[in-house]
Image (cartoon, rainbow, N blue to C red):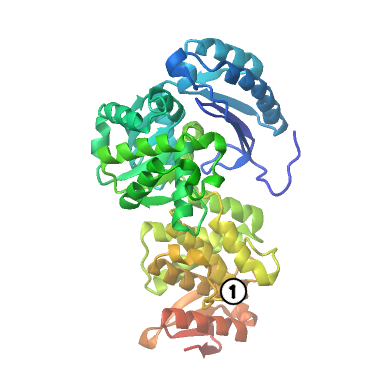
């Protein structure tokens, strides 16, 4: 048993996946099987197994040799990381090449485990499960663009429609088109005519899965000066996507702004990925493009979960894990969830389903910066939350969570708010201040320890006022500082508030 630090969840057992694609081969070691998967180690090689497969029908011989050498390393790394299980998945190139079976047999000898060669339908299914895993909920068409193939599949909540596999992966398309972008567009258009499911996606989201599309999204972020470098759930409007894709297909790719952030081995495939996305948009007419950082690997892991785990909220699961790892008391964090829910009800603040989820997550994350220097707790909390590997949350929601962390430490009237503020809707910004103001009150009464909040009550007072009432046994917690924080809450909410002790004194703070 490999000893683990307290920075890792002690009840998790690592597992690894090796994903053998047409362009890249990747090893990912996960901390454990969980609703919100956490990467323990991640490494890839751009092997290019599918390069030239259109003309030869075979896997590239040099890529095969390099892959075998890397498989030995991946096996050793998986063992070193303590992975108790290793799953190996192979996709388009390995299943279609005439020398694919020989390659798989050799790879199994090196890796000492069975390789699952996924059919096109299985690949589409796992890709769909990856999107279902990452969004709350997903509704649209998912497209997974690899080096050898494109999988398209309709998703609505947990319902998965029939999928289709098309030979439109970047490497294959480049080969078929003989490096002509005009010919590539014609080929894509002809093949997409078979994808009748795209018509059913009109006005819905298109979920873009795969490294080529993620790199295109990164270029779009650069071009638009987007303030948050988080790829998952990055959204591009249909109009913006069309204009951007035209630039990528018409300009020299090396001159596109932000291209230095893309691996040189991937750059040549970006125009082909852009063409595929252009033609999908023309056929589907989606409302927006949504980038998914989760795909076949995460979908496969999701399929291993039991039904109860699948139904868990991935954002809340991840926030609770961070609370366990970084807060002073996870019990106190759960009490915050309960107490703020009652406070919102007492103040008459209504919540949508997502707003309630985001409030719960913000409470679980409220204390993760406590080890930082007091002057930097707010900024550190904001940065950790804004850039955490959360799923099940869009970028405006992520901005809300981060701003609650900032305001909770640095004050609700702090105007030195970073650019991420622009991602939050006005409603989210207001809610972040209200929730942070509540947290600032209650932390001064609890010392960040459990047991106090369940005994605090909100009671109505005349003229629409509210009293925060401490039981007589906690009267010693009554004081000027919590009264001052309650005054801030009164300013944020426009309510008349009173701090009171049951059967004892009270102070009106507005």
Indicate the quadrant where residue 423 lies.
bottom left
450 horizontally vs 269: left or right = right
Residue under numbered circle 1: 410
Relative height, residue 286 to residue 68 (above, below): below
Q: Residues within 10 Å of mark 1 (few under 14, many from 20)?
A: many
Count of residue discs? 1
Residue 406: percent from left, percent from top: 56, 68
Q: Is residue 321 visible?
A: yes
Residue 247: percent from left, percent from top: 38, 46
Give SS at disc 1: helix
From the viewer's side, name the closer residue of 210 and 424.
Answer: 210
Residue 16: percent from left, percent from top: 61, 31
From the viewer's side, name the closer residue of 484 and 273.
Answer: 273
175 horizontally vs 193: left or right = right
Indicate the quadrant where residue 195 lies.
top left
271 horizontally vs 90: left or right = left
- Residue name at image x 43 percent, y 72 percent: 430
From the viewer's side, name the closer residue of 502 and 42.
Answer: 42
Residue 76: percent from left, percent from top: 71, 26
**Quarter of the image with the N terminus in it:** top right
Indicate the quadrant where residue 38 lies.
top right
- Residue name at image x 42 percent, y 60 percent: 356
- Residue name at image x 52 percent, y 16 percent: 59
From the viewer's side, name the closer residue of 459 and 88.
Answer: 88
Relative height, residue 304 to residue 4 (above, below): above
Q: Is residue 313 visible?
A: no
- Residue name at image x 56 percent, y 46 percent: 260
């Amino acid at each position: 048993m490999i000893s683990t630090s307290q920075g890792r969840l002690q009840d998790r057992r690592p597992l690894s996946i090796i994903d053998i694609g047409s362009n890249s081969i990747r090893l990912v070691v996960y901390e454990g099987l969980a609703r919100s998967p956490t990467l323990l180690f991640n490494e890839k090689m751009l092997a290019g197994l599918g390069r030239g497969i259109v003309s030869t029908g075979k896997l590239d011989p040099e890529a095969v040799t390099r892959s075998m050498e890397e498989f030995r390393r991946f096996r050793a790394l998986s063992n070193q990381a303590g992975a108790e299980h290793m799953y190996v998945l192979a996709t388009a190139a390995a299943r279609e090449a005439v020398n694919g079976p020989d390659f798989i047999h050799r790879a199994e000898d090196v890796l000492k485990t069975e390789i699952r060669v996924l059919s096109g339908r299985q690949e589409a299914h796992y890709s769909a499960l990856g999107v279902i895993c990452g969004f709350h909920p997903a509704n649209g068409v998912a497209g997974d663009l690899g080096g050898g193939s494109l999988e398209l599949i309709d998703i609505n909540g947990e319902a998965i429609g029939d999928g289709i596999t098309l030979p439109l992966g970047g490497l294959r398309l480049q080969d078929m088109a003989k490096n002509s972008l005009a010919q590539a567009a014609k080929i894509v258009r002809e093949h997409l005519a078979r994808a009748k499911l795209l018509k059913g996606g009109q006005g819905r989201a298109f979920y873009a899965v795969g490294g080529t599309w993620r790199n295109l999204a990164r270029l779009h972020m650069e071009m638009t000066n987007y303030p948050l470098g988080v790829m998952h759930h990055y959204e591009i409007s249909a109009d913006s996507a069309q204009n951007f894709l035209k630039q990528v297909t018409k300009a020299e790719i090396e001159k596109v702004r932000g291209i230095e952030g893309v691996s040189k081995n991937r750059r040549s495939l970006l125009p082909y990925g852009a063409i595929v996305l252009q033609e999908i948009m023309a056929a589907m007419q989606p409302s927006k493009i949504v980038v998914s950082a989760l795909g076949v690997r995460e979908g496969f892991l999701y399929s291993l979960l039991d039904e109860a785990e699948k139904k868990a909220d991935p954002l809340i699961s991840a926030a609770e894990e961070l609370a366990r790892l970084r807060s002073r008391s996870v019990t106190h964090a759960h009490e915050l969830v309960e107490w703020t829910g009652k406070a919102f009800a007492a103040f008459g603040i209504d919540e949508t389903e997502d707003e309630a989820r985001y409030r719960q997550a913000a409470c679980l994350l409220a204390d993760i910066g406590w080890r930082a220097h007091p002057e930097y707790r707010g900024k550190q909390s904001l940065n950790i939350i804004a850039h955490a590997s959360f799923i099940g949350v869009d970028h405006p929601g992520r901005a809300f969570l981060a701003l609650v962390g900032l305001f909770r430490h640095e004050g609700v009237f702090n105007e030195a708010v970073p650019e991420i503020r622009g991602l939050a809707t006005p409603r989210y910004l207001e809610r972040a201040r209200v929730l942070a103001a509540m947290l600032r009150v209650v932390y001064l009464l609890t010392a960040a320890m459990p047991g106090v909040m369940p005994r605090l009550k909100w009671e109505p007072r005349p003229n629409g006022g509210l009293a925060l009432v401490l039981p007589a046994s906690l009267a010693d917690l009554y004081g000027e500082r919590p009264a001052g924080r309650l005054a801030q809450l009164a300013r944020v909410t426009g309510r008349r508030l009173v701090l009171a002790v049951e059967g004892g004194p009270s102070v009106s703070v507005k």
